[in-house]
Amino acid sequence: MGGLNGGLRLYGLPATKNKNMRLTNQVFGVSNELIDTYIVRPKVDNLFTEGLQKNKHIIIYGASKQGKTSLTNKHLDESEYVKVNCSPSSTTLDLFNSIVRQLDVDIIESKDTRTTVGGEIKIGLKAKIKIPFFGGTDAETEATASREKEKGVSFKVVDYNLALAQDLSELLKEINFDKRIILENFHYLEEDVQKQLSIDLRIFEDYNILFIILGIWREKNRLSQFNGDLVDRVIEVPVEPWEESDLAKITDVGLPLLNADFSSVLEYIIESCFDSVGVFQEICKESCYSAHINRTQDELVKIKKENVDNAIEKKLNDYASRHIRCLESFIEQKAKSSDEVPLYIPYYFIKVLLDESFDNITLGLKRKSIQEKIKDIHHRSDNVRPSDMGYFLRNLVSSQIKKNISPPIFDYDISTTSVKIIDSTFYFFLKNCDREEVLENLMVPEGI
């Protein structure tokens, strides 16, 4: 890895006492709150802020713990957005309902509806909503809304189906809604829900109701695959890659805040974090704790290699316990009948993964290569068909979510036909763990 030179280095300057004491976890680490060492990366931050000025939806994507939420926290005040957290069980109706609830919309009455369209049951929510009325009268208003007065303010009562993007858009325009809507953890949604929202985004755009979508994936145009009409209508903001100089700036900013000097170990930490800002932040935090830095120090303290080694061991233990449990869940597969022995593709995929070079893993594992290597070691190699691999890869993320693997570790990139790791801490785990031991401790499926 090349040296870190240039005018950014602050080391060698005399440390000055900081009158504003800061706690270590306010300066370094992963947090839902904006930490003190957030750095602006023009390629990312400028693209996002320019997107805010345009009438387009914004999609922020990348691996986990790579700064997606921090980006929105940095550039948007809480008063400027409504945030909805997606979950595997969320429907479009759930998300739309959450938006309405957060706006304190006065719903007089509501009832669930079910209609059948093309043999498919559509669930809706008919609601009578009271809206302040400031305009004049017209025939359409008279026909669709009843009016009343309350404390000198005129209201109209309008019927909306809150399951429909069209109705929600009309409602939001009626109340002069001018915020952004943030959908966090979009990747958790069932694929059908993602597809529907991709279609709905086009409707919302017509009403200038603008969304910011945060998702864990690494491929471009993910939502455009569901709705080609979104091409050129959304702004995509990839939060990766993190350059060495970006990571170095983090410790530059942290130096005067804590009086902690990382100059002698900076390259070592960067080599250990594999371009993951989340891992980098956590190692910096734990290195400080190892050096007994819990808050701003009165005198400059130099972080040593042994402090970093202690931090790496601490984070490996933290990540290993989670990732091993996730791998156990990932390979678990029950037979549909007592006579059937499944192909256990997930188990063989993990065997192939743990045997791959780290460089190949970071580049992404090609579908063809995965299939060939699985066939080489499979107990029923002749039965492993391309269609089996296709089913496994298409459902890679959804199967992890159903098994409560959160965030998901693997994703299949259709555009490059390769499996990529989307949990940035998993690289750190793979590089530092004993892979043979991990494989030995995984339960071999019954029948192999």
Image: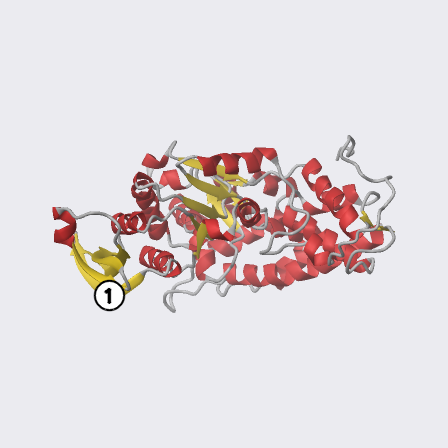
The colour scheme used to paint the residues is secondary structure
Q: Residue at x 70, y 37 (%)?
A: 244
For disc 1, the marked residue is 110
Q: Nearer the viewer, residue 275 or 17?
A: 17
99 sits left or right of 218 in the view:
left
| Quadrant where the N terminus is found in the figure | top right
On the question of residue 9 being in view, the answer is: yes
How packed mark 1 is, by other alpha carbons closer than 10 Å (few <14, some 14-19, many 20 or more), is some
Query: Where does residue 361 sit, x and y in percent of width and height?
Result: 60, 43
Given residues 430 and 240, the one toward you in this image is 240
Report x, y in % for residue 384.
Answer: 43, 49
**Front position in the image: 84 or 285:** 84
Taking 322 as reference, is 245 above or below it? above
Secondary structure beneath dot 1 equals strand
Instruction: Name the residue located 85 percent from the left edge and 46 percent from the top edge.
Output: 15
Taking 119 as reference, is 252 left or right?
right
Residue 273: x and y in percent read: 69, 47
Q: Nearer the viewer, residue 8 or 267?
A: 8
- Amino acid bearing label 1: Ser
Vertical position of residue 300 compared to residue 414: above or below? below
In this rendering, position of residue 394 left or right of residue 23 = left
How many discs appear?
1
Residue 112 x, y percent position in the rendering? 23, 65
Q: Residue at x 84, y 43 (%)?
A: 264
